[in-house]
């Protein structure tokens, strides 16, 4: 088994004004390649903070974070940017560009990575087909439903072929049927493509679809359950 992630005693203190907030108070766990893991906790428990660390968007205050064997805890901004190439991040509010169509949104990270022309188009179309959006490629994201936008965001995260996928509240803005379809897609991606996926959520139903669940409260992991 290959460990993709290793966290040891990760803490995060936000200092804004007089009273510091200890958003993470010592988080330790590991994730093996090919796992599908949910992190379940109420609002304010530190889920997004934790995901931002794992996604190399921010640095922990203390503790050790190892991504694919590299200790990134003390990386500078340039090194973190390099690490981010391993990560597919699906943001809670999708962060798509409304005026661009689906395929152009998915092409963006490829453009940044220096992939152009027909190759870029083909990769973006493959990613959209993978999430079941083959028929909606030229729709502007503003013309798509919430569930479809979520899939575009997934395609955009997957198009660079990351080592793992991080999803922040993937069903938070979807109705329950669309949320179920989304989870079907995630489970399928994990089983068929062997994609490693970490989902943070406050929704027990979402957590019920993953074999392993870490229960989070007040910046700590309370329980690590494999069913
Ligand atoms: N950028 C920030 N600056 C200051 N405090 C923050 C910041 N981001 C989050 N927090 C605080 O950290 C705690 C955890 O927040 P967050 O990670 O967003 O939790 P969750 O995603 O589980 O709702 C909360 O008390 C929140 O107010
Ligand atoms: Mg959050």
Image (cartoon, rainbow, N blue to C red):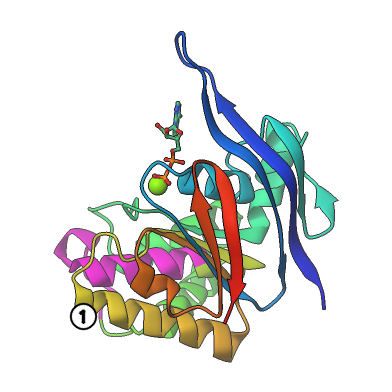
The image quadrant in which ligand 1 is located: top left
Quarter containing the C terminus: bottom right
x, y percent for residue 48: 47, 46
Please tell me which residue is depicted at 50% across the width and 78% down the height of the picture: 210
Q: Nearer the viewer, residue 177 or 133?
A: 177
- Determine the residue located farthest toward the top in the rendered image: 18
- Determine the residue located farthest toward the front in the rendered image: 222
Please tell me which residue is depicted at 49% across the width and 41% down the height of the picture: 218
Residue corresponding to mark 1: 177
56 to the left or right of 109: right
184 over 22 or under it: above or below: below
Please tell me which residue is depicted at 52% across the width and 75% down the height of the picture: 123
For the image, the number of numbered tags is 1
Please tell me which residue is depicted at 78% across the width and 60% down the height of the picture: 68
Q: Tell me the SS state at disc 1.
A: helix
- Determine the residue located farthest toward the left in the rendered image: 143
What residue range appears in magenta? Answer: 136-157
191 over 47 or under it: above or below: below
Residue 162 in view of the camera: no
Quarter containing the N terminus: bottom right
Q: Check disc 1: other Cα within 10 Å, few if <14, some if 14-19, many if 20+.
A: few
203 over 44 or under it: above or below: below
Query: Is 71 covered by the magenta stretch?
Result: no
Q: Main secondary structure of the magenta part?
A: helix
Q: Quadrant of residue 108?
A: bottom left
Q: Quadrant of residue 150?
A: bottom left
x, y percent for residue 206: 38, 72
Query: Is 147 covered by the magenta stretch?
Result: yes
147 over 177 or under it: above or below: above
């Amino acid at each position: 088994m290959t460990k993709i992630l290793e966290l040891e005693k990760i803490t995060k203190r936000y200092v804004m004004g007089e009273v510091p907030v200890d958003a993470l108070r010592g988080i330790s766990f590991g994730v093996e390649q090919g796992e599908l893991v949910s992190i379940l906790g109420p609002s304010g428990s530190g889920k997004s903070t934790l995901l931002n660390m794992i996604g190399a968007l921010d640095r922990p205050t203390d503790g050790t974070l190892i991504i694919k064997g590299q200790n990134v805890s003390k990386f500078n901004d340039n090194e973190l940017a390099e690490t981010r190439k391993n990560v597919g991040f699906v943001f809670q509010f999708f962060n798509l560009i409304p005026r661009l169509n689906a395929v152009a949104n998915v092409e963006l990270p490829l453009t940044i990575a220096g992939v152009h022309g027909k190759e870029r188009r083909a990769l973006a179309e493959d990613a959209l087909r993978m999430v079941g959006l083959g028929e909606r490629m030229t729709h502007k994201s503003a013309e798509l439903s919430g569930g479809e936008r979520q899939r575009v965001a997934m395609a955009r995260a997957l198009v660079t072929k990351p080592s793992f996928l991080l999803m922040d509240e993937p069903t938070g803005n979807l109705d329950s049927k669309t949320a179920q379809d989304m989870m079907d897609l995630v489970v399928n991606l994990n089983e068929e493509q062997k994609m490693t996926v970490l989902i943070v959520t406050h929704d027990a139903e979402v957590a019920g679809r993953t074999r392993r669940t870490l229960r989070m409260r007040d910046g700590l992991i309370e329980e690590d359950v494999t069913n």
